[in-house]
Image: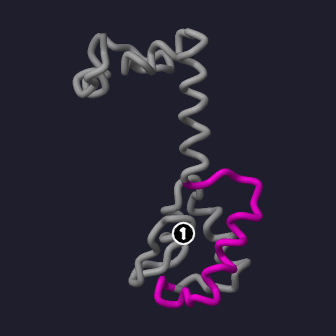
Amino acid sequence: MPFIIGTPIPDNKILVQSVSHIFGIGLAESGILCKKAGFGDDARGIHLTPEKSPLLENLVDSRALLVGADLRRFQKDKIRRLYSIMTYRGLRHKKGLPVRGQRTHTNAKKRTYFNTNAS
């Protein structure tokens, strides 16, 4: 099972869908990347040889997109910044409540129920 940017690529799954499992790469972007790397629409993870794996990884790195752990770190830093400057959105994130104006009277039970940091 090959790995691309820390994400395992299953042998039996279609390669376009497998590449879209990388955090930050969608189905359309993975289709573009696979075509540039020279894989067909029906290519599977088995067809990803050790010679072609670095090519696909270099194509992902050459894009001006954050993917994988870098994207997760960027998102967490943005939320941490909201905490630190004490914005309304930051406080909603911290309390585990909906951030974008959704109602909380009848909805958003799951987000508040499982949050142990809510005060």
Q: Residue furthest left?
A: 113
Residue 84 vs residue 21: left or right?
Answer: right
Q: Indicate whether 17 appears above or below 2.
A: above
Work out which quarter of the rendered image holds the C terminus and state it: top left
Residue 45 vs residue 107: left or right?
Answer: right
- Magenta segment includes 51: yes
Work out which quarter of the rendered image holds the N terminus and state it: bottom left
Label 1, residues with CA under 10 Å away: few <14, some 14-19, many ≥20:
many
Give the residue drawn at x 48%, y 62%: 21
Residue 105 vs residue 79: left or right?
Answer: left
Q: Position of residue 28 (x, y in %)?
A: 62, 62
Secondary element under disc 1, as helix, strand or loop, is helix
- Residue marked by disc 1: 19
For badge 1, the amino acid type reads: Val
Give the residue drawn at x 56%, y 90%: 49
Q: Residue 94 sits in which quadrant?
A: top left
**Which region is colored magenta?**
44-68
Q: Position of residue 103 (x, y in %)?
A: 38, 14
Q: Position of residue 39 (x, y in %)?
A: 63, 85
Q: Residue 105 sits in which quadrant?
A: top left
